[in-house]
Image (tube, coloured by chain):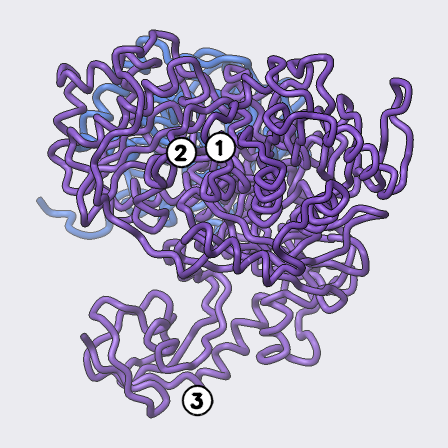
Chain colours: A purple, B blue
Amino acid sequence: MAKVTVDGIEVEVPNGATVLQACEAAGKEIPRFCYHERLSVAGNCRMCLVEVEKAPKPVASCAYPVADGMVVKTDSAMVRNARRGVMEFLLINHPLDCPICDQGGECDLQDQAVGYGMDHSRYKEAKRAVKDKYVGPLIKTIMTRCIQCTRCVRFASEVAGVPELGATGRGEAMEIGTYVEKALTTELSGNLIDICPVGALTSRPYAFVSRPWELRKTDSIDVQDATGTNIRIDTRGPEVLRILPRINDDVNEEWMADRGRFSFDGLKRKRLDRPWLRVDGTLKPASWGEAFRAIAAKLKAKQADRIGAVAGDLVDAESVFALKALMGALGSANLDCRQDGAALDASRPDFWRFNSTIAGIDEADALLIIGSDPRREAPVINARLRKRHVAGRFPIGRIGPAGVDLTYPHQHLGEGPAALRALLDGSHPFMQTLKAAKKPMLLLGRGALARADGAAVLAASWQVAAASDALRPDWHGFNVLHLFGGQVGALELGFVPGPGGKDLSDMLGGGVDALWLLGADGFDPSLIAPGTFVIYQGHHGDRAAARADVILPGAAYTEKDATYVNTEGRAQRAWLAVHAPGEAREDWRILRAAGDALGVRLPFDDLAALRAAMAEASATFAGAFARRGCEDTTPPAGDVAALTDAPFAAAIAQYHLADAIARASNVMAECARTYGEQPSLEAAE
Amino acid sequence: MSAPQQHAEPATFEFDAESNAQIEKIVARYPAGKQASAVIPLLYVAQKQMGRLTGSAWVPRVAMDVIGARLGMPPMRVYEVATFYFMFNTKPIGRFHLQVCGTTPCMLRGSDDVLRACKDAGHLKGYGETSADGLFTLTEVECLGACVNAPVLQVDDDYYEDLDYDRTVALIEALKRGERPTPGSTIGRQTSAPEGGPLTLLES
């Protein structure tokens, strides 16, 4: 530890820390453009200059290591003068177009210019202009505004793992770009907008839409992948205008995946905004009362065990709980939330959770990926894996389709379960790597379970984890990576067939006469037996709604106070940002009202009561999230001998069109067109 | 730097046997895992090969990609290096690359005349231009480090020193005829010794 005095405040910081970190520890704000906590230090903007006693000139604090007894001044005449000089140089070529710049109002350069800028320019020569670059359908570039901090270059090569951005040319002619005109091949491109300190990289869909002070900000959770990214929804009136990540070091650090960030325009299209009722074979608009009466008439005539319910991928825990309560009150145990048919063993939470936790990735020292493509299934978790790879000594093996670029090198062990068998009988050398590791991690993709021998894959994976000593009270190395934000919540609430209940395939094949689909768009609705009475409750007129006999319009994740559980089993709360369109209502209220119509009163009248009941039903919703070790090594059900030789397929073939909201989004459609030509996606299709 | 789209880029690039022999030697100079250090020499080899095979010594984008793949570095990192150094031509140039030094010593010693001679004899309009016959490209360079023999004109890799208008025209005419005059001083100066022969240390 080194003692450093910053403006008279004495702080202790670890050796090797930078002066900037010491200043922050002392509560002093240091202006900066190029420095970013999660990127390497560049030290090229010079805005963070401070005075260090006995140093002959101002030092760039972001790149200057502390020494014991150092005395730092952050607000001396020398510092102010130096920063003014830097600002004047930065503004030489920066255009004065703040009134038409989308960064205006939340621009680092604008803010710092207020502090250190002059009221006029002494620069009389011609300003430099730079041609705008095309880097993809999501990012708008105005390169004349670029101050060449190289944050985007470092983000692309260090965090996103796509070293496609760079600085070409030199001196006055230096430009940031891709040199070869092309869209950046990353699922994290939106983060470039956040890290750009000026208006050079801005959001294309958000261009000229709004000013930050006009926006109402609501905390929420991204449900479009299972990471549980903490987000902030910016709204103006009834419209979602943009979505930004919030910082949560345990989950998403400060990154966010593109699908969650840019697909919200799909929330305005193809929406179900009023109840519909099938009359004589065609869907006709109806009132809530008519819809409920139709449901009551049909369901009351059915036997309880001939009614089933399926929960979708994007649903919140509250509505799943309400639907389970409704089905329970009706006397049906036909529940399923595994639309993809994933053979998840629901008997114990650690069979379906990401037990090592996302933050735990930083501690792991070996990784085996089975049937998963984390880059497309959970880009932010993939960035975390990449971060671990960059830190070094992290052997990675993967079983799955060949030729997948995860943005970090890894050993391809095989395409199918044969490689699992080889690991189990010890004939594959990677098993030794796993055994040698102190904290080996096994990442099992949900896609690897959605197949005929899914249960065997689950059991075999568990056995590999057990054999590599990954199942210990102090380290749980067995992880399942889910695909969407609603999947784990339903599992935590036990939305799976109860005693004597039918699962999805039984229900579809005529096992039930009435089927309640709660946002369930993840399977082919043509599989539903023709005579089945289908109730679709959800927010998008996607695949399943067309098959429905009654449509109940629900709320999307931006439109309700709700709880979502991420792949770790971490329950996180989202708040209502905008109201659902038209007559659409929050889903738990719909189910509560449907219960009344069916003559079964559900035991909660408001959200608080529902949440209390939910917390009682599952500890996941009761307290704070904590990482757990493996107390019970009993394997999941499933016979390893049943492993087939069919290769694992990609769970998400087209990243930008993977869920109902994204499929309704124009922005995502354009992304799919742009990236559809990428070989990695093509191969996965 | 100009974007590569503004001129015709070859579709493929491959190092020939001569280049490959050079590359093997170059790459072997660096320890394993540090092969990226060889990027500058390899760009130079590519540029030389283009000059040898097509008569225009430049580095097409595909060549940079090939170098990136060869050295295990992302193509963007190669583009950054290639565009940083003006010695690498990222667009096609003429058969002869006339590089006029215009830095102070050369300027004082008459580089303006050299420039005028290049323009007149090479039929060039100005810096950055390539003549219509594709023979010459004119570039302004900073100090070439041959100030004692100023003014200097660098043709491809060769220095021609102590030039004036007439001698520059003669040099360019010779180049047009396919000759390569001996590089060095054009007034018979011995290396960088004083004009007309040594003035000191006369007795051996």
Q: Find numbered disc 2 in the image and state the secondary structure of the residue it sits on.
A: loop
Give the image quarter of residue A642: top left
Q: Find numbered disc 3 in the image and state the secondary structure of the residue it sits on.
A: loop
Which residue type does callout 2 highlight?
A: Ala
Nearer to us: label 2 or label 3: 2
Residue A547 on image: x %, y %: 75, 21
Q: On the image, numbered disc 3 is attached to which residue?
A: A76
Q: Are marks 3 and 1 in contact (CB under 8 Å)?
A: no
**A160 to A457, vertically: above or below:** below
Q: Are marks 2 and 1 in contact (CB under 8 Å)?
A: yes
As drawn, which residue projects farthest toward the left?
B204
Q: Are marks 2 and 3 in contact (CB under 8 Å)?
A: no
Answer with left or right where residue A356 lies relative to residue A440.
right
Q: CA distance from mark 2 to mark 1?
A: 7 Å
Which residue type does callout 1 highlight?
A: Val
Please tell me which residue is depicted at 37% across the width and 47% down the height of the picture: A358
Q: CA distance from mark 3 to mark 1?
A: 66 Å
Q: Which mark is residue A346?
A: 2
Residue A673 on image: x %, y %: 68, 25
Nearer to us: label 3 or label 1: 1
Q: Tell which circle, 3 or 1, labels the residue nearer the N-terminal end.
A: 3
Quadrant in the picture for the C terminus of chain A: top right
Q: Which mark is residue B196?
A: none
Dot 2 falls on which chain?
A
Q: Which mark is residue A496?
A: 1
Taking depth in this image into account, of A523 and A221 the one nearest to the observer is A523
Are dots 3 and 1 on a single chain?
yes
Residue A586 on image: x %, y %: 71, 50
Q: Tell which circle, 2 or 3, labels the residue nearer the N-terminal end.
A: 3
Dot 3 falls on which chain?
A
